[in-house]
Image: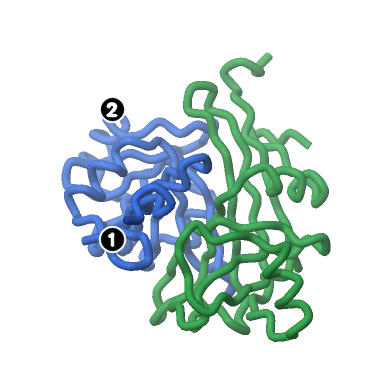
Chain colours: A blue, B green
Amino acid sequence: MLTNDGFRSLDRPECLRLLAEVPVGRVVYTRQALPAVLPVNFALDPDSSVLLRTSAGSDLVRAVDGVVVAFEADAFDARSRSGWSVVVTGQAGVVTDPAEHERLLRTGPHSWMPIRDDVFIRIESAMVTGRELVDLRTTAG
Amino acid sequence: MLTNDGFRSLDRPECLRLLAEVPVGRVVYTRQALPAVLPVNFALDPDSSVLLRTSAGSDLVRAVDGVVVAFEADAFDARSRSGWSVVVTGQAGVVTDPAEHERLLRTGPHSWMPIRDDVFIRIESAMVTGRELVDLRTTAG
C-alpha cells in the first residue's frame, strides 16, 4: 500500500528479506531511564529472531536480558531520497541452553569486536514492521 | 583513546563533524511504553542541536514533544568492519517561536516526505557521545 505520505508498508516476509541484506542494525532500549541505542552487527536465525554476539559481562547484556527491546535496520539513498526501514520488537534474552549456545558458536554471527566469554542475545521477532520510502519527486503524477 | 574492545571514543567536536556528514539518523523514544525508533533526515543547527521537519499532526510530534530522546547516526563498512556511531541525548521540543519557525522554513532541513503544516522539532545536544570501530584484524600488533 502506498500511503499519501510517501511510505509503503512492508509485510513481514518483505521485512525479513530486507533485514537479511544488511549486516548492521541498532538495538533500542532503556538505560538508566533514558532512551539508548547501540549499533551492532547481527544475523537472522531460521526462526526469524535477531541474533547478536557479545561479551558475557557487557553493558548490553545487563541492559537488555529479559526485557522488550526494538531492533532497527535501514538503508537509504540520499540522492534518490528513497530507502526502507524495518523494526523488530520483542523480548531479548541471553541464550542459556548449552546445545543452542554450541550451535550458535558454529553458525551464529561473528562479532566485529573482540569479545570475551561469548554470549548470544536473541531478540524474538514478536512484532515486525517496515516501510519503504518512495521518491515522490519522480513518482508524483 | 583506543580501548581494548576495538572502539575509540570520539569527543564532542568529532561527533558533531561526523553527524554533519550523513543525511539520515534515527530518533529513539518510547511509544506506549515500548522502545521505538524512527529514521528521519535531519540537519544540525549552528548551536549543535538536531533539527527535524515533520507534520504538525504526526505521531512523532505527539510522542517526543517535551521529552528526552536519543538521536543516533552511524556509518559502517562491512568489508573493512569499521565505522562510527554518534548518539545525541537531550530534550526534544517543537519550535514554537514564530521568528525561529520562519528562519527554519528558509534554512532548516527539507523533509524527504511530503508534509502538511510544517513543524520543526529541535533535539538539544545535552549529551553527545560517539565511538569509532577500528578493524582489529588489520591493526592488531
Mark 1 neighbour density, 10 Å: few (under 14) some (14–19) many (20 or more): some
Q: Is residue B72 above or below residue B85?
A: below
Q: Is residue B133 above or below residue A119?
A: above
- The residue beneath circle 1 is A129
Name which of mark 1 and mark 2 comes first in the sequence: 2
Which disc, if any, is residue A106? 2
Where does residue B81 sit, x and y in percent of width and height? 53, 27
Subunit of label 1: A
Subunit of label 2: A
In this rendering, does residue A93 appear at all?
Answer: no
Q: CA distance from mark 1 to mark 2?
A: 30 Å
Q: Is residue B86 above or below residue B65?
A: above
Q: Quadrant of residue B5?
A: top right
Contact, mark 1 vs mark 2 (Cβ under 8 Å):
no
**Residue type, label 1:** Thr
Left or right of B125? Residue A3 is left
Mark 2 neighbour density, 10 Å: few (under 14) some (14–19) many (20 or more): few
In this rendering, does residue A66 appear at all?
Answer: yes
Depth check: give the residue in front, A5 or B85. Answer: A5
Depth check: give the residue in front, A15 or A137. Answer: A137
**Is disc 1 placed on a helix, strand or loop?**
strand
Where does residue B22 sit, x and y in percent of width and height? 62, 45
Q: Quadrant of residue A33?
A: bottom right
Which disc, if any, is residue B104? none
**Residue type, label 2:** Arg
Q: Closer to the observer: label 1 or label 2?
A: 1
Residue at 60% over, 61% down: B71
Residue at 24% over, 47% down: A16
Residue at 76% over, 68% down: B126
Where does residue A45 sit, x and y in percent of width and height? 23, 42
**Is disc 2 placed on a helix, strand or loop?**
helix
